[in-house]
Image (spheres, rainbow, N blue to C red):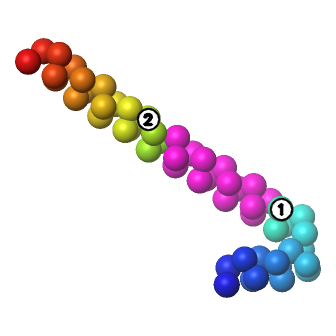
Amino acid sequence: MIVRAMDRFYARHPRIAFCIALVAAFAVLYVASDWDKSDTAALRMQMFAARGA
């Protein structure tokens, strides 16, 4: 549904659609990086807690 709508939009406005796709990809990668950093920090804290016990 979203892909078909984006295809129709791309047919009329290819440059704007490309910019939207770039921004969406950047946002997804940014959020994934943030999740990865927070998961790494939580794992590191668990390892420090186990080492100290």
In the rendered view, tell whether residue 4 sits above or below residue 36. below
Residue 21 lies in the magenta stretch: yes
Residue matched to label 1: 18
Q: Amino acid at mark 2?
A: Lys
| Horizontal and vertical percent position of residue 35 | 44, 44
Pointer 1 local density, CA inside 10 Å: few below 14, some 14–19, many at least 20: few
- Residue 50 appears in which quarter of the rendering? top left
For the point 76% across and 82% down, which residue is it? 4
Give left or right: position of 34 versus 52: right
What kind of element bears circle 2?
helix
Q: Which mark is residue 37?
A: 2
Residue 34 lies in the magenta stretch: no
Placement of the N terminus among the 4 image quadrants? bottom right
Most common SS among magenta residues: helix
Pointer 2 local density, CA inside 10 Å: few below 14, some 14–19, many at least 20: few
Taking the view exactly as shown, the residue that stands out farthest to the top is: 52
For the point 60% across and 47% down, which residue is it? 29
Residue bounds of the magenta highlight: 19-33
| Horizontal and vertical percent position of residue 5 | 75, 83
Placement of the C terminus among the 4 image quadrants? top left
- Count of residue discs: 2
Query: Cα distance, mark 2 to mark 1?
Result: 29 Å
What kind of element bears circle 1?
helix
For the point 30% across and 31% down, which residue is it? 43
> Is tag 2's residue or tag 1's residue first in the polypeptide sequence?
1
For the point 75% across and 55% down, which residue is it? 22
Of 51 and 41, nearer the camera is: 51
| Horizontal and vertical percent position of residue 12 | 91, 80
Give left or right: position of 50 versus 23: left
Of 43 and 29, nearer the camera is: 43
Q: Amino acid at mark 1?
A: Phe
- Choose mark 2 or mark 1, whichever is in front: 2
